[in-house]
Amino acid sequence: MIKIKNLTKSFSVNEETIMALDHVNLDIQKGEVYGIIGLSGAGKSTLLRCLSTLEQPDSGSIEIEGKDIFKLSGNDLRKFRSNIGVVFQGYHLLMQRNAYDNISFPLKIRKEPKEKIAARVNELFQFVGLQGKERVYPSKLSGGQRQRVAIARALATNPSLLLFDEPTSALDAVTTKQILKLIKEINEHYHVTIIIITHEIGVIKNVCDKVAVLNYGKVVEEGTVEEVLNNPQSDITKMLLGKELII
Amino acid sequence: MSQIIEILQRVDIFQGIVDTLLMVAFSTIIAYLVGVPIGVLVLATEKDGLFPNKTIHKGLNIIINLGRSIPFIILLIALIPFTRAIIGTSIGVRGMIIPLAIGAIPFVARLTETSLNEVDKGVIEAAKCIGCNNFEIIFQVYLVEAIPSLVRGLAITIIMLIGYSALSGAVGGGGLGNIAIENGYYRFDTKTMLVVLVFIVIIVQVIQVIFDMIAKKIDKK
């Protein structure tokens, strides 16, 4: 479903060129929960920003359902974007709109009929377990609840691909467990392909089918979670697993 | 006390308040109708903006800065022929509306740009990912998310215009400022001037308190 080919992106910081992505190649199948793990600065966020077309790569391509996403523009680009859901690390909710209006926002932008929007949004409130919070504004919600609103908003248009940027980094242990459970349920219930960016091995263990390890912009290891976790090859994977300490 | 009553009987403070509020209300409306679109345009034409355009962005910035650096009293006099052509008179309450509005436009444009700039860039990116077009991002994200800040800016603009409107005395305009200048400056009647000033201070305070309350009430952040 998703083919990432030779994706390369560099930034210059203080006259120094940093390779955020260095010829990244990945194949992600439909319906998979795919984890991308690495330390901060490994290029994970850049990869996610490329997948959501917020960032253009220097070279290489990403094909989603047969379409090169960087060749889209205008209406095609907006159509593509409304068919992927992005759950940002900082949630990025509309602060002056309540939970209901946040979740219905993508559907309003699509100009869906009112009754259809109401049915869908109510279903999502049930699904993410936020019934009764419809009229509450994001500033009055807890971190976990905001995350649920962000997830419901990303799911609103019934996307075929859902991107998560560090979904658990700001949550406590209990909330993390609940959110991971929710991500699993989304995958099972809506059959949506999910890509999760994280630096926590627990997220990979708990919800992912496959994993790619990113280090300095390069994919150093890739495979099913079982393979990679049971038989890690690279130092960085071992370190992320806590098996080896590199000082 | 009896002196104050004497002043209030001699000077038509009520008419002054009405005149001041009329001048400020109409000029604020005009300044916002023109200033807000300019502010939006400055923001949108930024390098990383929705419609990047260096020429428009720089041009508007220069015009705004120029407009803001002209002292209002000079603008007021320079605009006399223009005001006369549009309104038919350059004096009185009606003659003040156009100069006040034009004086406030660059200010409103800058305030609007600043308010919109405060909107979290992440929210704008989220809106892009949702599939919003640029107009939806401006009208349904930027302008909605910035409402509390825009309301606070509105209070600043109104209070600034009350101050500017006092200069109307210099061109034979109306309002409280005119009464203050006429009596206090031209007739050396300090007591009358002070009484009028008290009213101006009260109006400014009331406006600030009301707008603070509104901004607090509507801000959900």
Image (cartoon, coloured by chain):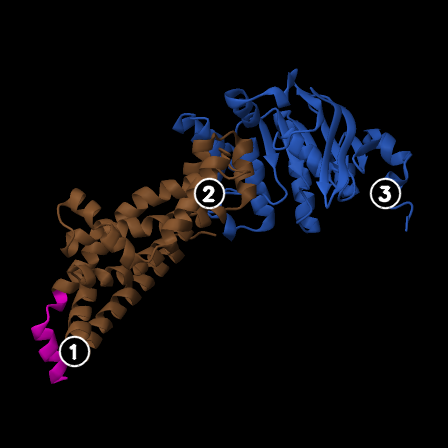
Q: Nearer the viewer, mark 3 or mark 1?
A: 1
Q: Amino acid at mark 3?
A: Leu
Q: Which residue is mark 2?
A: A134
- Residue B189, which numbered label? 1
Above or below — where is A56 with respect to B122?
above
SS at circle 1: loop
Looking at the image, which residue is at 39% across and 45% down?
Answer: B63
**Horizontal arrangement in the rendering, residue A3 relative to residue B12 (left or right):** right
Q: Position of residue A29 (x, y in %)?
A: 72, 21
Label 3 sits on residue: A241
Q: In terms of secondary structure, where does tag 3 sit?
A: helix
The letter of the brown chain is B
User: Which chain contains the residue that carries disc 3?
Assistant: A
Mark 2 vs 3: CB contact within 8 A: no
Q: Nearer the viewer, mark 2 or mark 1?
A: 1
Q: Position of residue A93 (x, y in %)?
A: 53, 43
Q: Is residue B13 magenta?
A: yes
| Image mark 1: chain | B
Identify the magenta region.
B1-14
Which chain shows up in blue? Answer: A
Of the 4 image quadrants, the one containing the N terminus of chain B is: bottom left
| Residue B159 can be seen in this image | yes
First in sequence: mark 2 vs mark 3: 2
Q: Residue B208 colored magenta?
A: no
